[in-house]
Image (cartoon, rainbow, N blue to C red):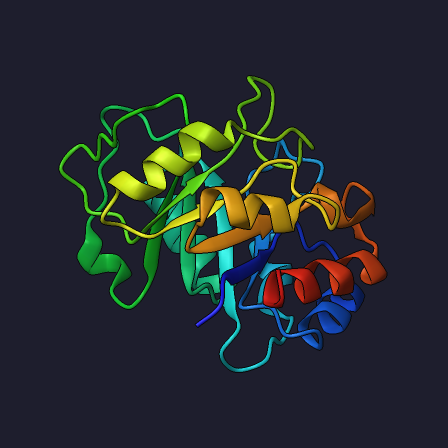
Amino acid sequence: MGVFIKICGICSEGDLGQISALGPDALGFIQWPKSKRYIAPETVGRWETPEGVRRVGVFVSPAEAELAHAAQHARLDVLQVHRVPDNWKLDRELFRGLEIWRALNPDELYFADHGFCFDRYLLDSYDPKTIGGTGKTCDWSKARDLVRASEIPILLAGGLNPDNVAEAIASVKPWGIDVSSGVEIEPGVKDIEKVKAFISICRNP
């Protein structure tokens, strides 16, 4: 199996349809209202995606009720959580059948799960004002060490684009790749040709 590919920050049904036709493994929808790429879960829920393409909701320090609402209305398969607080709790039984991914900065050299078992980790660059879509790469050297040390599969994100993704895959050897701003015309508007090139390179790095 090749590298898992997630195209994140989908903000329109038109982009979703064109990108779905290119065969990614997952599509990401930002569920954080402060993001320029925010899209309401009810809107996402009206959009159809091909069978086998995972629908990923992206959250920041979410409450359980927020996750439950979005999971139901956006018809999500995966909950991707950024900035997990120390006291974060989740009743896994309420989200049976969904994967839970935790986003981290590579500067966090250990995985503190607070007693919670995550299905995947996502390594991204850090910005105090926002999450994802910054165009900044994370530390690939640290990311490579974390990929080697972790028993849980890891996706690499942060500043990836068609020009550097082959090098990123070769250097870090992640389970998956996540891109947002690197294939955009502007925040929330995808450049379909860049998405096509990105997916092609990931399939044949």
Q: For residue 157, which quarter of the picture?
A: top right
| Image quadrant containing the C terminus | bottom right
| Image position of 190 with respect to 124: above or below | below
Q: In this view, does 11 lie to the left or right of 205?
A: right
At 56% across and 31% down in the image, what residue appears? 131
Residue closest to the eye, 159 or 114: 159
Counting labels gives 0
**Where does residue 142 sit, x and y in percent of width and height?**
41, 28
At 42% from the left edge and 34% from the top edge, which residue is drawn? Answer: 143
Residue at position x 41%, y 55% in the image: 175
The x, y position of residue 166, in whole percent, is 63, 51
Q: Kindly tell me whether residue 39 is visible in this rendering.
A: no
Q: Position of residue 27 (x, y in %)?
A: 58, 61
Farthest-out residue, left: 115
In depth, the one of 129 and 108 nearer the eye is 108
Q: Which residue is drawn at 30% across and 42% down?
A: 148
Relative to residue 180, is residue 83 drawn left or right? left
